[in-house]
Amino acid sequence: MIKITSIDDLYLRYGYELKKAFSNKDRRVYTLNKGVYFGADIVTFEESENCQKIIKQLSDSGYACRLKTFRQGSLHSQRIS
């Protein structure tokens, strides 16, 4: 399994902010605020992780959300809003 700190380091290097209130050991939420663009990447490490409540909260706040799931060494991405 990939180390969560490696994912954190990568996102922070590209200017994203870790949203600790939404993050835990199975999920990380990163936001990017550049000009008029507000984006959020929700990265999960468990396929069963339900992120709909977080996605709704972020979408309602104006973020374009993208859900990414790590599955045995590969990354699957889905644009939500």
Image (cartoon, rainbow, N blue to C red):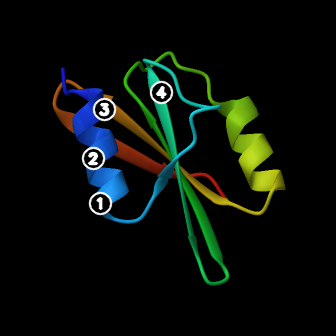
Label 2 to label 1: alpha-carbon separation: 6 Å
Label 1 to label 4: alpha-carbon separation: 19 Å
Q: Is residue 55 left or right of residue 28?
A: right
Residue drawn at point x = 54 percent, y = 29 percent: 23
Disc 1 target residue: 13
Label 2 to label 3: alpha-carbon separation: 16 Å
Disc 4 target residue: 27
Disc 3 target residue: 70
Instruction: Say if 49 sits above or below 67 in the image.
Output: above
Q: Amino acid at mark 2?
A: Asp
Residue drawn at point x = 43 percent, y = 20 percent: 47
Circle 4: element type: strand
Q: Is residue 26 left or right of residue 33?
A: left
Disc 2 target residue: 9
Label 4 to label 3: alpha-carbon separation: 10 Å
Q: Amino acid at mark 4?
A: Arg
